[in-house]
Amino acid sequence: MNAGTNTITTNTNTTLTFGGLLEGANLTKNGLGTLVLSGNNTDFEGLMTISAGALRIQHSNALGLTGLGRDTATFGTAYISGGPITIVASGAALELAGNISVGDESLVLSGTGIVNGGGLRNVSGNNTWSGQIFLNAASRINSDAGTLTLTQQVTNAGTTGNNLTLGGAGNIVVQAAIATNLNSTGAGTAITGTTLTKDGSGTVTLQGANTYTGLTTVANGVLRIEGAVGSISTSSGLTITGGAVVQIANTFAATGVNRIGDAAALTFTGSGAFQFTNNGGLVNYTETLGQLVLSAGSAQVSTTQAESGQTSTLTFTGGLGTRGATATANFSGVGLGDSTRNRIVLSTAPTVTNGIMGGWATVNGTDFATYDTTATAGSVRALQTYTTTAENTWAATNNVKVTADTTLTAGRTINSLNLTLAAATALNIGAGNTLAVNSGGLLVTGTGAGSINGGTLTANTTGASNLFIHQYSSQALTIGSAIATMQGRSCDVGQVRYWNARAHRREHLHRWYCIE
């Protein structure tokens, strides 16, 4: 088919498949339907414009032979020349399928695609796009399935920072930088802005030295930063929510000491995980951020222990920011805080009351968290000492550990309660008695089923705190005691807000439940 400067229109809910050869100059795809190109179109030398609907390509040369200096285009202050160009209008989409590898073809995106499905969309297979991508407006790139690999820079094509969203159930690998400069050569005046949002259940891997300056938000799935230069060090901050995971993946061959900006806050606005990992070797690992802000949900912050004789240090220079009333955190890692092989450092040391950071904080799901300066120069660490004596010795400052059936002979006030269960174990508060936990911290761990029966369980004697129940046991916890009214609660009177580590587990994250 000789395109000339013609238009192909596909109507709504229709698909036109063309497997022959496309020749000629420019071609515009119109109409809300789908046009499929599966041929080896090495004789097509024009500008490809997708004005509406979807253009799906199933051959590496479906858009023409790449690498030819045939097209030019201007967007805002960006002038693109020197190679073939495909332009995707707002509301339209370029779709990749069939395990293809498109060469050096510039791509201009101007929106989020068809029904937010992505202006560039990987619909099946493992496909590669090796041309530079220009954002002419806030845009989305999705991978529905398989892996989409982007080998060149993603950059702005306007005078302001155009935001980018990467999503889908499939995976995306960005090998070069997501940047804020203005033209295809990487030159031009740098502009501020451009936020990056990761959503969808798939994994996005960043391997380039990204230079965008806006916020990074991870709302679902996994954002992985890896490689010799992989970083988001100029991003203004990192926000995690919706059960999402951020992985800082270091290796002995690629330590990446500045993957995130030293002043960038790590903020949890919902449940999620931040993982600082390494694969050992005779190297030291370090990463520095700004504040750790726990606004809501359950934050899981984990670090990997370095080899013997080496160090691993995750530092928050701003310490802990303001914590939401119901926010919790579990810090995890082998030997966390026991030596310099694995540390989480809060440069402004947190307040430690009666030995713990608060009822909201745990380590490895087995202990309450303290901030310890005895084993190292400072690190989050598991509480080392609990009160394990008879219940009639318990005091308001005690962090109590119960490992066997226990019955209270009177009301008790303690600081925290750790139920470590090797077998079915019952804590009987007793009729007319109240067990008040001043920090609000109740941790359940081990392999046995647990129960708390009779009397009243409350965060403290005045009911002025939240009760945090961290359920990490592999068996059920049953609470038959009355739950006293707690100020600032998110659940109704007579209910308790707790983490269930047995049910609905995903990436070791646990969801909130309210029970009667």
Image: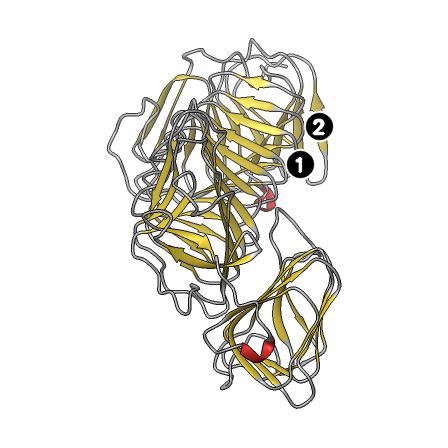
In the figure, 162 relative to 323: above or below?
A: above
| Side of 218 relative to 38 (left or right) | left
Gap in Å between the C-alphas at discs 2 and 1?
8 Å
Q: Residue furthest bottom?
A: 432
Kindly indicate whether the residue at mark 1 contacts the one at mark 2 (C-beta within 8 angstroms).
Answer: yes
Amino acid identity at mark 2: Leu
Local secondary structure at mark 2: strand
Q: Going 60% across and 46% down the picture, which residue do you hit? A: 115
Of residue 341 and residue 131, the one placed in the foreground of this image is: 341
Q: Residue at x 49, y 20 (%)?
A: 130
Query: Is residue 436 among the parts visible in the rendering?
Result: no
Specify the quadrant of the image occupied by residue 229.
top left
On screen, residue 435 versus residue 296, left or right, reads: right
Sequence order check, earlier mark of 2 and 1: 2
In the rendering, at what x and y percent does residue 5 appear?
Answer: 52, 21
Q: x and y percent of residue 502 in the render?
A: 70, 56
Does 433 sit left or right of 288 as displayed?
right
Q: Residue furthest left?
A: 189
Above-or-below relation of 429 to 193: below
The image's mark for residue 10 is none
Circle 2 sits on which residue?
16
Whole-percent x and y of residue 487? 50, 81
How many numbered marks does the figure carry? 2
In-front residue for pair 492/288? 288
Instruction: From the top left corner, tell me how far across and down residue 448 is, in percent.
Output: 73, 59
Q: Amino acid at mark 1?
A: Gly
Query: Label 2: how many residues lie within 10 Å, few (<14), some (14-19) or many (20+)?
Result: some
Q: Which residue in the protein does label 1 denote?
A: 33
Q: Secondary structure at mark 1?
A: loop
**Quadrant location of the N terminus in the rendered image:** top right
